[in-house]
Every structure is written in C-alpha cells, then in structure tokens.
Image: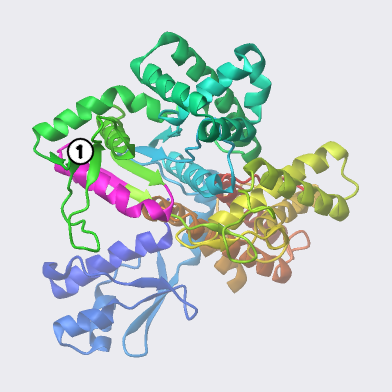
C-alpha cells in the first residue's frame, strides 16, 4: 500500500513530462508534508530556473497537466510558486481501511535481497559488557526491519573464538582440572583474568600456552576438544544474555573467526595470484588504492605476517568472500563501531579489486558512537571497569519494576514482573536506537525510564492507553470498509498512519533506526492530540464512534509493530 507521497510523486512527474517534455521526466517534484495543506510541491521553483520562466507560470502549467482523479481534492498556488495539495477525503478513508485490513501497508520486496548482517560479536571466555550493547541492539533491529520487508536475512555473530589467547585459556582449563572447570568457566571474566595473570607472571605457563596455540592451529584432537568446551560454555552464556535482551540471535547464527581459519591460506594465495597481495618488509600486504597515512604513504592491509601468521584483516577478507560466494549476499552489513571505518573500507575495496563482488553487491558499515556515563566519558563502573551487560539490563528491569508497582499496584506479581521486564529492556533499547547511531549518547536510567518525552516507556504507555479504550468500553475492534477522517487532528493522525511503510523502507535504505523511533514518537503525540480533541466512546453518532475506534486500533497496531521492529515489546496494559 503506497504512502500518499508515493502516489503523488509519479503524478507530478507525469505532469512535468506532459507540460515541458520528456527531457524533464526525472525532475524531482520535491513534495513535502506541509502545515498549510496536506502536502506542498516545491519543484516548480527549481524547474523555473531551468526553463527560464516565472515560477508561478510553471506551477500553473503543472497543475494544468496534473491528474487529480481519486487522489487530489484541490490544489492552489501559493507564494512565489509553491503548489499546495489537499488529498481527497474518500482516498484517505479508503487507504486507511485497506491498511487496517492488511499488514499496515508494508509491502514485501518483489526481488528480495539476501542481507548478511554482522553484529554483536563478543569474545569467547569473556563476559559481554556495555561495549557490546549498541552492535547487538542496532543489528537486531535492522534484521527485523529487513525481514518485515520480505528480504532473506542471514545473521552472522562473528565470535572471537580463535587465536593466540586460547593457548593460555586452554592451559588454565587444564590446570583447574577439566572435570571441575565448568563452574569456574561460568564466571568468564574471572576465568580470563586468572589465565592472563598467569601468562604475564609465570614464564613456564606462558611457554606452555605458546605451545598449546601451535597444537590448536595444527588440529590436535585433545586441544580442539578443550577449545570446544570453552566455546560451548561461552555460547551458553551469550544465549542467556540474548534471551534477557530479547534479541533474535541463535546458536545457528554463530560464525566465529574459527569458521574462516581453513580459508585463510587460500585467500592469501588468491590475492597473490591476482597481484594484489605483495611482499612488503617480509609480510604479504594488500594496498587498496586511495588509503594513505599521515606521511602520505599507502596504508597496508597485512594479510600474512612476517612469521607466517594471519591477522584480523585476513579473516575479514575471507569472511566477506564467504558471505558473498557461499551465503549469496547481495547486501553485506557490518554493525561495528565507528573506529573501524577505515579498516572496513579497505576490506571492501580489496574484495572489490579482487573481483569477489561487483557494484551489484552493497557492502555497508553501520558505524555507531560510544555509550557514555554522566561525566561524558566511556561508561564504566565506579571502580573504572567495564559495566557487565547483564548487570546493566537487570538494573533497568529492577528500576522499571519499582515504577510499575507504584503506578499499578493492582496487577498481580507475575504481570508486574513481565511488564517491568518489557519496560526496562525496552527503555534501554529505545534510548540507544532513538539516538542518531553515529553519535555518542549518555546512559541515564532516570531519563530512559521516564514515562514522558521521547522514551520507550512513553511509547509503550501510549499503546497500552489505546488498548484500555477497548477494555473500558467493552467493545470489539470494528472492520469498516472505510475509515473517514472528519477533523484536522483526525486527518493528521491518518496521514501519519499511512506513512508507516515509507518510514520502514527508509530505515532499510538508510540503516538508521532512529528514523523509526522519531516517527513512532510523532505518532504517539499525534494520537494524544486526537484523543484529547475527538471523543471516541462518546462520539456523537455510531458511525463516528466506529471510525474513531478503527483509527484507535490502527494507531495501536502501528505502534506495536513499529516497536516490535525495534525489538521492543508493547504490553497491552501498564
């Protein structure tokens, strides 16, 4: 179901073509929502410069060729050549009913992409901390959006599960005794720090660890079995965090560094065969064009070290090749911190230069800023350590529980707990997603858990408030053939509801979830204005009551669906 702008734009382009010739067919009519009318077209101003004609004359010629049938109620020329457009009430009533009867206007892609999304990516034998929050939340929201639009989504949780640290971790596991190590491994931070402490201060342990790395990389069966034990314990822990956070990552989505280990030598050989991998100071490097350091010297991607080992660049090159060739990606998205921008750009450029993919494959870095504390520095504990993600989430739920219990003490304990979890986790997610992802933001429980302003709880409460109308009135949701809008506030709400599919499509294109957050906040505010000005259960006529109830239900469904795309629950009561 098309948003009205999507209906208006081609009609204006056709009018431009008919009025001024095919050479102007692709001129942007620059349609925007307007406070003077439903929409305003500014395209006549730019076209007037091209044609060297007065803007109002150009606007008049456009209106003479514009097809209004079934869509436009009236038009007028304003100011120097703006065109104000009012939509037909019958069109709005019909579109709203059609949207309400279907999937809220969302249209599944006729030619779906295979979208590979790399996100979360914690390290084995280390606890997840606040630094993993943004990648996990943003990546999961994008995965949900693409799936809602009918694309095939392949989640890739690129675990740090291979490399030199595993020598010391396996030796520490052996020192503890494999049979009794599970309890210790469950406290991953303590386990890792103990292994690191021994490695740094016990030369015998360090030497054993180095030998163990060689055994691991050589495929020694006993060593691989111990490595698998560490990975399995970590994956169970990650799964518990993902469950608490309410994200869709599963064990099947794990694609750790170890997956690409057998492909590294082959990747380097191919780069050398293509003339892209060249020897430089004993190492094999790729020098993608356009990347220079402060000294204006080319910046290398080191794909094989002097000692014959491989690094992150080799793994990332093997990964993008695998994702395109094996997984069939037509769009590869990396939800990774902004600090990795140059590294990923070099990986993308190297893969393209190698011919692994062309312009038909979109490779995109979804960069994001940091989570800050009240002091505007990296969010840490008072002792200066990284905040455990589980602790952060459980604190949010605990605070939400206190608020829910105070606001609605009549709810039973189980429902209070369920709502508190939805509100607490939703507040954390929304605070993250509602910020422009490239910017840092300050983590503030009081602000994110507030029931007013642009917050998750405000939107959840707006949804619950609408649902309470039906409970209090003891009425069913009507299914009218049309949902007429009689007042300006009803029309404003109706136009916003029709905008939902366009906003979701924009998020998929721009990879900016904050646009959906902004839309939902505007929708909730518009509904509040509607509810204050338009009686629903006490409407003047049965017909008006039915249309307003249908509008209420549609608003609640769009709020719930939009929050769902962000990974946030919408409880029916709060």
State the image coordinates of residue 555 (x, y, percent, origin top left). Answer: 61, 55
Residue stretch in magenta? 336-363
In which image quadrant can residue 107 be found? top left
Secondary structure, mark 1, is: strand
- Colour theme: rainbow
Would residue 142 be found to the left or right of residue 327 on screen? right
State the image coordinates of residue 352 (x, y, percent, origin top left). Answer: 18, 43
Density class for disc 1 (Cα within 10 Å; few <14, some 14-19, many ≥20) is: some
In which image quadrant can residue 260 be found? top left
Name the residue nearer the viewer: 90 or 406. 406
Would residue 104 be found to the left or right of residue 45 on screen? right
Q: Is residue 531 visible?
A: yes
Residue at image mark 1: 283
In which image quadrant can residue 218 be found? top left
Residue that protrudes farthest toward the top in the picture: 221
- Residue at (55%, 59%) from the top-left corner? 434
State the image coordinates of residue 73 (x, y, percent, origin top left). Answer: 43, 71
State the image coordinates of residue 528 (x, y, percent, origin top left). Answer: 68, 66
- Residue at (78%, 51%) from the top-left corner? 399
- Residue at (20%, 38%) from the top-left corner? 283
**Is-magenta flag for residue 351?**
yes
**Is-magenta flag for residue 497?**
no
Residue that protrudes farthest toward the right in the picture: 410
As displayed, is residue 193 above or below residue 291?
Answer: above
As displayed, is residue 77 above or below residue 191?
Answer: below
Would residue 430 be found to the left or right of residue 360 on screen? right
As displayed, is residue 542 above or below residue 113?
Answer: below
């Amino acid at each position: 179901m098309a948003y009205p702008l999507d209906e208006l734009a081609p009609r204006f382009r056709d009018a431009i073509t008919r009025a001024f010739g095919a050479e102007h067919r692709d001129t942007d009519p620059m349609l925007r929502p307007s406070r003077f009318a439903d929409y305003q077209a500014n395209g006549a101003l730019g076209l007037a410069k091209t044609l060297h004609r007065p803007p109002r004359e150009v606007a008049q010629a456009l209106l003479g060729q514009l097809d209004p049938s079934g869509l436009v109620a009236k038009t007028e020329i304003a100011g120097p050549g703006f065109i104000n457009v009012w939509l037909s009430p019958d069109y709005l009533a019909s579109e709203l009913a059609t949207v309400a009867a279907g999937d809220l206007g969302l249209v599944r892609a006729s030619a779906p992409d295979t979208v590979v999304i790399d996100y979360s990516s914690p390290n084995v034998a280390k606890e997840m901390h606040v630094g993993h929050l943004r990648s996990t939340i943003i990546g999961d929201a994008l995965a949900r959006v693409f799936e809602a639009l009918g694309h095939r989504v392949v989640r890739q949780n690129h675990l740090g599960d291979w490399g030199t640290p595993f020598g010391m971790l396996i030796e520490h596991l052996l020192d503890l005794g494999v049979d009794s190590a599970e309890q210790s491994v469950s406290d991953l931070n303590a386990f890792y720090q103990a292994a690191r402490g021994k490695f740094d201060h016990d030369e015998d342990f360090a030497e054993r660890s180095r030998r163990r790395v060689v055994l691991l990389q050589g495929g020694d069966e006993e060593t691989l079995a111990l490595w698998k034990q560490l990975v399995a314990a970590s994956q169970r822990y990650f799964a518990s965090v993902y469950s608490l956070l309410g994200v869709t990552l599963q064990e099947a989505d794990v694609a750790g560094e170890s997956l690409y280990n057998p492909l590294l030598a082959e990747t380097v050989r191919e780069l050398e065969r293509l003339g892209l991998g060249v020897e430089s100071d004993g190492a094999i490097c790729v020098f993608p064009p356009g990347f220079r350091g402060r000294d204006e010297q080319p910046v290398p991607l080191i794909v094989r070290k002097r000692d014959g080992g491989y690094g992150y660049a080799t793994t990332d090159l093997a990964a993008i090749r695998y994702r395109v060739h094996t997984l069939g990606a037509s769009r590869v998205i990396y939800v990774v911190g902004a600090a990795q921008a140059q590294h990923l750009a070099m990986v993308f450029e190297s893969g393209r230069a190698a011919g692994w993919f062309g312009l038909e494959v979109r490779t995109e870095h979804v960069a994001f800023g940091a989570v800050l504390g009240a002091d505007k520095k990296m969010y840490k504990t008072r002792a200066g350590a990284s905040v455990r993600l589980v602790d952060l989430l459980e604190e949010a739920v605990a605070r939400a529980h206190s608020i829910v219990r105070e606001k609605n003490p009549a709810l039973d304990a189980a429902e209070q707990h369920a709502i508190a979890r939805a509100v607490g986790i939703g507040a954390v997610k929304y605070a993250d997603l509602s910020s422009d992802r490239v910017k840092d933001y300050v983590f503030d429980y009081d602000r994110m858990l507030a029931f007013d302003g642009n917050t998750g709880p405000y939107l959840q409460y707006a949804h619950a408030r609408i649902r309470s109308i039906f409970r209090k009135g003891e009425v069913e949701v009507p299914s009218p053939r049309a949902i007429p809008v009689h007042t300006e506030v009803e029309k404003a709400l109706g136009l916003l509801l029709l905008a939902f599919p366009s906003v979701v499509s924009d998020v998929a294109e721009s990879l900016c979830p904050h646009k959906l957050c902004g839309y939902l906040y505007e929708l909730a505010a518009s509904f509040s204005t509607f509810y204050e000005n338009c009686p629903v259960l006490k409407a003047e006529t049965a017909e008006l009551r039915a249309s307003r109830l249908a509008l209420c239900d549609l608003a609640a469904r769009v709020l719930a669906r939009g929050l769902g795309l962000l990974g946030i629950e919408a409880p029916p009561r709060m």
